[in-house]
Image: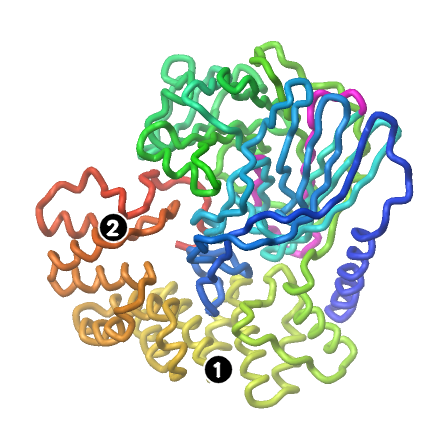
Amino acid sequence: MEMKAALAIKWAFLGIFILASSPIHAQNPEDLKYREYDEYVLTHLLTAFGPVPTALDPDGVYPYVSYCETSDRPVLKKYHFISIENEFLKIVVCPDLGGKLTSILHKGSGKEILYSPKVIRQTRILPRYSFVAGGIEVSFPISHTPVQNERVLFKVDWSPDRIYVTCGERELRYGMQWAVEYSLGKHDRVLTERVIYHNPGHSKYPWMSWSNAAIPASSDTRFDFPQGRVLVHSSKLDTITWSEQGPKTESGIKEMTGYFWLTKEATAFGVFTPSAGCGLYHIADKKISPGIKLWSYGVGPDSSWSVLSTERSQPYVEIQGGPLGDQSIRAELSPDETGWHLEYWIPTDKPLDILKLEIPEVRLRSVSDIPLFQWARTEDLQPWMDLMHAYQERTKPTNPPGIELNCWAPSGLESMDSAFRWAIRNTEDSSAELWAFYYGTWLAARGLTESAINTLSRNKLGIAKVLLARILKSTGRTREAAEFIRSVQEPWLQLHPQVVVERDKILRGLGPSALGERELWLSKVNALKDEWIIERRVQLLIDQGDIAKAKELLLGTNFQKIHQSYTRTGLWKQITDKLNIPFLPIPGSLGEDRLARFGAYREYE
């Protein structure tokens, strides 16, 4: 069965590229225009965390790479765009940015409705620390989507009076398929969006889905949201009554805050900025897509966070809808189960009454006609497809990818076990060790922790020992973890910042007896400006009792801003407790937000 599945996946993978790249032969419908084009966008480069896979990593989502830095200066990069328009609206979709809708032009006013930076400038937000604000982003199977800056597949279709642009892929984490369909009819003044997701696998998998629209904000940006009870996620969690306690405009929000509607009197919501003369509203059937969220960085000190993804100081707010109640909730998709939801976006040059808005009467094709795609990126899949094909044909095993490529076997490929075992048996020396490392990594990502430990513990590669140490630490076996990470022999790996940080966290778990060893390793890299290493040096100084020097190093470092990570705040708390000085206010130089812990942002803690 595994051999047949491997061959089927290979041909489906190849076939979808033929489909997606086929030329368009039909004529466009009257009054509807469609165009595909390539365009350069200034893009800031990313630096990967390192070669240790993201399996069981709270700062990552396997098998995707996590990033630790964004370059200050951008480079030229070409992206593919698709535009569709009628007499009222023009929308632009970018399959090369995860299928994001990057622009809505309201033709009557000539206004760009969406927050639309002219650069790709990633910020440190989970799941990969490479979030880019702007446009309308569809998130699946987590929030935010792991492939926001990756190329996905697309297909353009039309009926006599409607154009459909569908983007999607088979995601790598669980192997589930998702697609977002944007469509525009001849006389539509609204943008119609449908999201479909399907589990072709053999196990249940968790998911969430949110559609996230970013809109330029000013102090007079008005929030038109329904009355009801609202969960407030800021520096604390609270519940308010929107009509009595909710902010009316952006000027009423003093810190970064998310609002989730627990009850609602209407299904419509939106924002309008009088000074800009435009806004965006959203409506959906409450039985299909009841989720409502508003996000703002506010007008206080946190407003600086809202310009991290742009080339100029223009803040934004986000309005979001989806089929779930809030972002602490994950649903499950059973094998062969399909789900979908439908939403409408209403661009406008005047404020609208949400109590009078009605769900548009739009004739759409059947949900079963929405394309579902296979794997999207050759570079992610090819080594593993080649291995499975070689196993199926019983030819010579292919060469495993080098560890410098950060290419790890997708956990969404369920049927790789036998192929890995076969490759390990039929290769020698370094190739066999490398295949075994990737096998152990895949097992860990699939949740088969003991099998992963057994496989990796026999591996001679230092990279395997580092991953094994992380796995052992996560199961409470700290002393074993320390022994394995101590046994790493490759000099380059011993000094890699990713390994330095992993090692220090593990050795700290051994208590005061490891202080000298920790100091020895951290002294070898104390000229590096890597922020994660600096965090470990501060922690070592605290543990050694040199609190004044720890405070000096922590406050003397101008950290980059990072969401939903509180290591530096925790270090500050330790310092203030020991010095008996006030903890609040938390220094802004630490670069961490003050959000209360909430939401399913991390898979492993």
In the rendered image, residue 324, in percent from the top left (x then y), is placed at: 55, 34
In the rendered image, residue 20, in percent from the top left (x then y), is placed at: 79, 51
Q: Looking at numbered disc 2 in the image, what kind of residue is underneath it?
A: Gly
Q: Residue at x 60, y 75 (%)?
A: 401
Q: Which of the two labelled residues, at mark 1 and mark 2, occupies the earlier sequence position?
A: 1
Q: Residue at x 63, y 76 (%)?
A: 420
| Viewer-proximal residue among 159 and 449 | 159
> Relative to residue 563, is residue 488 depicted above or below?
below
> Relative to residue 472, is residue 140 depicted above or below?
above
Q: Residues within 10 Å of mark 2 (few under 14, many from 20)?
A: few
> Relative to residue 169, is residue 588 depicted above or below?
above
Q: Is residue 474 left or right of residue 437?
A: left
Q: Residue furthest left?
A: 580
Quadrant hosting residue 358: top right
Quadrant hosting residue 183: top right
In the rendered image, residue 258, in percent from the top left (x then y), is placed at: 42, 31
Q: Residue at x 54, y 83 (%)?
A: 433
Q: Residues within 10 Å of mark 1 (few under 14, many from 20)?
A: some
| Viewer-proximal residue among 464 and 78 | 78
Quadrant hosting residue 100: top right
The residue tagged with tag 1: helix, strand or loop?
A: loop
Q: Looking at numbered disc 1 in the image, what kind of residue is underneath it?
A: Asn
The residue tagged with tag 2: helix, strand or loop?
A: helix
Q: CA distance from mark 1 to mark 2?
A: 35 Å
Residue 203 magenta: yes
Find residue 570 and name its label.
2
Mark 1 highlights which residue? 459
| Viewer-proximal residue among 2 and 42 | 42
Q: Is residue 135 left or right of residue 359?
A: left
Residue 542 magenta: no
- What residue range appears in magenta? 186-212
